[in-house]
Amino acid sequence: MEIRMSSPRVLTTDTTSHSRQRAQAQVHREETEPLNPGWLRTFVEVYRTGSFGGAARKLHISQPAVTHQIRLLEERVGTRLFVRQATGSKPTPAADSLAHDAEGPVDALNFVLQRYSSSGGPPGRIRIGAPGDLISDRILPLLADLLLDSVQLRTTPALSDALLSQLTAGELDIVVARTRPRVTGISALPLYDEEWSLVAHPDVARTIPEKHLARKAPHILGGRHLIACAESLPLIDHYWWSVFHAEVPAAPDVVVPDQRAVLAAVKASVGIAVLPTYLCADDVAQGALVPLLKPEVPPITTTYLATREGDVTRSQMSAAHSRLLEHGRRWT
């Protein structure tokens, strides 16, 4: 009796066919299954910190775990996302594109998860530095609802240079600065253009010959007490150069802590001052203050929203940063 064995060629063909089918099924599953959001979160941290190790520390996971998740994400999207270098991980153009789409949703998801977490952990803390008048008049009203969501807020009123130094040192999370940050490691976005006005109490204004003011302002104003919130006169100096094309003739006669104190001193007839137009607009409208000049093009300065590079990662901080950026650009 003859026993016929199956042809090895047929067996090989069948095995290859089954392998191909399994591979196609795997590809189909990968293409139809939702993308793991954990991979995207890890990707965003690597993108922001510039290194796999930095992302691991932020996420409190091992560096091999970060490497594994990025490899899985690269396989899923079908392209390389980072080039490992001695100084860190350089994102590819594909990573730049993915980060543009993913950062907002990842931050929003982190915020939702933390807000509705039942872990009972301590509330998030945000440390914001800004000029005192901006903290009270603009920042606090804008972030009021975040404070109701168990967010601890710590504010530091100071001049911009001092605030940026604290930001660099890690003592602040967000700074609203009235001068352009030029500090290594600090990321700054233009927030809004702020208009400035030269004002005085009506009694003081009456002692200034208006008809000669525009032409001889530096000389005429030199005899009036000048009120400022810093010895360096950064914003007053800007006004003088913009309007009079000259330097401020003298040091300030009165120095007070912030622009609100400057406003109070001007209203008390102590002297003249340059103030943010928004801050003195109501008093001007009511006649409590008088603008000494009305330039055709009012002097403006740009206010900036500054953070440490790659540091807008915590959900509450991201929410505060986004809120300030979105609504702050509508300020005038």
Image (cartoon, rainbow, N blue to C red):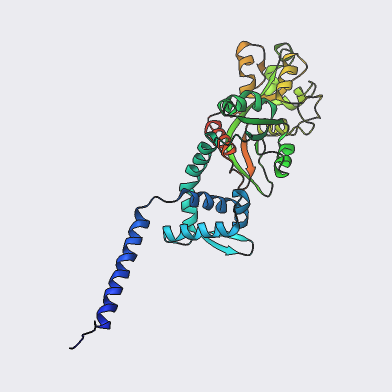
Q: Is residue 1 left or right of residue 228?
A: left
Q: Position of residue 167 (x, y in %)?
A: 70, 41
Question: Where 70 falls versus 18 (above or below)?
Answer: above
Q: Position of residue 63 (x, y in %)?
A: 60, 58
Q: Measuring 69% from the left and 27% from the top, which residue is drawn there? A: 132
Residue that extends furthest to the bottom in the rendered view of this protein: 1
Question: Where 110 falls versus 264 (above or below)?
Answer: below
Q: Is residue 19 left or right of residue 163?
A: left
Quarter of the image with the N terminus in it? bottom left
Figure label count = 0
Q: Measuring 52% from the left and 34% from the top, which residue is drawn there? A: 116
| Front residue of 109 and 201 | 109
Residue that extends furthest to the left in the rendered view of this protein: 1
Q: Is residue 294 visible?
A: no
Q: Is residue 280 visible?
A: yes
Which image quarter: residue 319?
A: top right
Question: Where 49 falls versus 174 (above or below)?
Answer: below
Which image quarter: residue 133?
A: top right
| Front residue of 68 and 323 | 68
Q: Measuring 56% from the left and 50% from the top, which residue is drawn there? A: 45
